[in-house]
Image (cartoon, coloured by chain):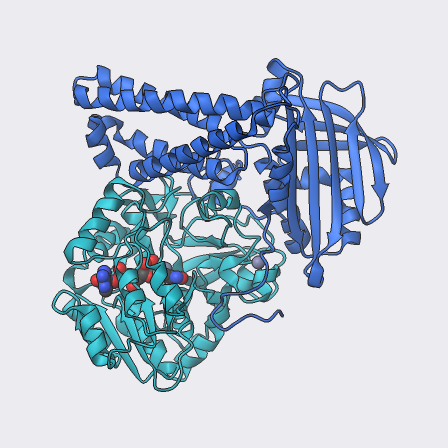
Amino acid sequence: MKANCWYGAGDVRVEQVPDPTILNRRDAILKVTSTAICGSDLHLYNGLMPTMKAGDILGHEFMGEVVEVGSEVTNLRVGDRVVTAFPIACGRCLPCRQELFSLCENSNPNAWMAEKLLGHSPSGIFGYSHMLGGFAGGQAEYARVPFADVGTIKIPSDIPDEQVLFLSDIFPTGYMAAENCQIQSGDTIAVWGCGPVGQFAIRSAFLLGAERVIAIDRFPDRLQMARDGGADTMNYEEEEVYDRLMEMTGGRGPDACIDAVGMEAHGPGVLAAYDRMKQAVMLESDRPYALRQAIMSCKNGGTVSIIGVYSGFIDKFPIGSIMNRSLTIKTGQAHVQRYMAPLLERIQRGEIDPSVIITHRMRLHEAPQAFAKFNRKEDHCMKIVLTP
Amino acid sequence: MERQDAGGTTTLEHPTASDDRTGSAINSKPGFRSRSPQRDHSDDASHERLAQTLGWFSIGLGMAELFAPRTVARLAGLPHDHRWLLGASGLREITMGLGILSERRPAGWMWSRVGGDALDLALLATALSSAQGNRKRTAAAMLAVAGIAAVDCFASRHLSRMVGWTSDDGAVLIKKTIMIDSSPEALYLFWRDFQNLSRFTEHVESVTIYDRHHSHWTVKGPAGYRVEWNAEITDDEPNRKIAWRTTSQADIHHTGSVEFTPSPGGRGTLVRVVMEYNVPAGVLGASIAKLFGSEPGQQVQSDLRRLKQIIEVGEVLKSDGSLHGKGILQQRPAQPAGSHT
Ligand SMILES: NC(=O)c1ccc[n+]([C@@H]2O[C@H](COP(=O)([O-])OP(=O)(O)OC[C@H]3O[C@@H](n4cnc5c(N)ncnc54)[C@H](O)[C@@H]3O)[C@@H](O)[C@H]2O)c1
Ligand SMILES: [Zn+2]
Ligand SMILES: [Zn+2]
């Protein structure tokens, strides 16, 4: 089959590789019908994630048709149409039973590597480094899905791929970012980053009862899409974010702040240059520019919801601000399996149309061009869907 | 289902497999296999502090090599074609740094630093002899690494003597714990059938049962090397504990025990393994030592994790990348192996 393989920073190639086979009794094999490129894939593409190996198949957002099932998968049949959750989870361990699926204790064969860097290991993730399992991803014609009985949701035949594909990651991710804000009626939520994750966080915050959402980014097209979703917007290159937020909230700050940017934050000024330099020469794997701003801006007693991905260590972390002002930090890889069914219902009820964020439809063999385009945010690129 | 607050953070204890801190405390108990019981303890503390500093140095340098190989290469005057090596060397530095910082007596990790220093020096030496790089800078970098190497060597030797790894009999003590969602009864029965060991340990190839107390173990090592021994059960408390040891004829003296304790709050069973290997010096000893990799115990912890998978989900989960083993060197690319499986 054809698959999109990682070869190094800025280097992905579509190559011919062997077809996947059933390796465990709860596996299923999918014939992939749609797959997407995620902002998280860019961290791999830019070489910021340790323990990648040349030849790794990328992709954790995919859906398709079941073509084979293992002997212990009883709830799926050949021919079913399913969306896959990006964290791999057994459904039986304690964290899984607590619905903390991205913390499954039985799905990372290389857990010891993650333990070295993180202290404990999270779950395995499709196509996301050897430290997170060494699983082949779904940017391919076929994909193996371990624990397929827990990690997939069946899709009725009348809903098109583009409406449901993002149940695999970014819709649940954005939703969890908003849910973590514990929104009360009347709340103002600020969202840093208007990429796909930010867009779903904005829409989910409204679904969960936010009064106002303030969205922050620098790309006019992305800010426009945030306004289409009901948000007020701010271009951080044109305005002082902290000052403007205080002005809009009577000096109190937003009730909750969502960081939907992650470790590749871009920023103006000395501090951002400092982070770039730190990341380039010493002791910092992540650039926490947006995160620091989110913490400093949040109201006393408020919540900072970190949904952007960080991989290692940061510097100049304002712990004093967090401690003295009773802030709560909530974060994590999305526990996708928890959200797939309720969010599918919201889609079916027409409360949200996830397909609005798709700006580009390309073929799997064009993955290298697609990665370059999305990385540079060229051509108003927001979200690319690839079809084999 | 357990209670958990809305946002997915949880206030529950960590039930994950973990490095047993009390285990390393045993490792560092003063006088454990030490050849010099009357050491000066303030001296030990300062060597530990030195090791800590080197730990942080490792992480810093590692991050730089990993995330900014070009900048580091430029600063060190390395030519273009050597830069990819820095990534590998960066990961090594970070791992070692974390290893040194997380061990109470970081001797093993310190020695891995010495090995790493040798690698860095070799890398820089190659650069020095190639025309492309900047010789002055490379020479300066070599001097810096050589200086660090000397300090590493000093700290490692001291810490090794403290922990006792360098004892003549090459003893290795391992203590690991994991929480498994099952009853002590079921776990005891599973383990009591020693034939099950080969299902979850990476190195036990087979166990032949002679009678209720005697068995024969075949253990595989690197490069197809095999060790065999007879074992006898020395303690057998149903549903609570099993202990065993090699019989006197074996080359290797191995003792082990496993205990099953119900966890508070009905969260499963705490499985606690203690093993000790007394390995003869020489070639055989070196091969046995390799069984445990650079960190004795990591192997056992991975084994316990596989036991947990078998009990909780019925089988050991495979990924394409880890088909040939979990070590970083055994990883194959994360793509289907085809007929290879
Ligand atoms: N936690 C999870 O489960 C999960 C799942 C998916 C994605 N993610 C992460 O979410 C993040 C966003 O993903 P995405 O797909 O939307 O990526 P993206 O790259 O399309 O979007 C990031 C956006 O952040 C903006 N940005 C950069 N610096 C900023 C700053 N200083 N202030 C405000 N905005 C800034 C960029 O302009 C861009 O629009 C990534 O880190 C990704 O890895 C997390
Ligand atoms: Zn993603
Ligand atoms: Zn699980």
Q: Which residue appears at 60% of the width and 65% of the height?
A: A97
Residue B327 lies left or right of residue B264; in this view the side is left
Q: State the residue lying farthest toward the left.
A: A238
Residue A285 vertical placement versus A344 (above, below): above
Q: State the residue lying farthest toward the top.
A: B282
Q: Position of residue B83 (x, y in %)?
A: 26, 30
Q: Position of residue B246 (x, y in %)?
A: 77, 26
Residue B240 vertical placement versus A170 (above, below): above
Q: Which residue appears at 31% of the width and 29% of the height?
A: B85
Q: Position of residue B44 (x, y in %)?
A: 52, 29
Residue A7 lies left or right of residue B267; in this view the side is left
Query: In which quarter of the view is residue B119 placed?
Result: top left
Q: Is residue B7 visible?
A: yes
Q: Position of residue B237 (x, y in %)?
A: 85, 44
In this view of the protein, which residue sits in the foreground, B114 or A223?
A: B114
In this view of the protein, which residue sits in the foreground, B239 or B339?
A: B239
Q: Is residue A34 visible?
A: no
Hue used for the chain lettered B: blue
Residue B151 lies left or right of residue B286; in this view the side is left
Ligand 3 lies in quarter: bottom right
- Numbered-mark total: 0
Query: In which quarter of the view is residue B82 placed?
Result: top left
Q: Which residue appears at 21% of the width and 57% of the height?
A: A266
Query: Among the chains, which one is cyan?
Result: A
Q: Quadrant of the N terminus of chain B?
A: bottom right
Residue B295 lies left or right of residue B279; in this view the side is left
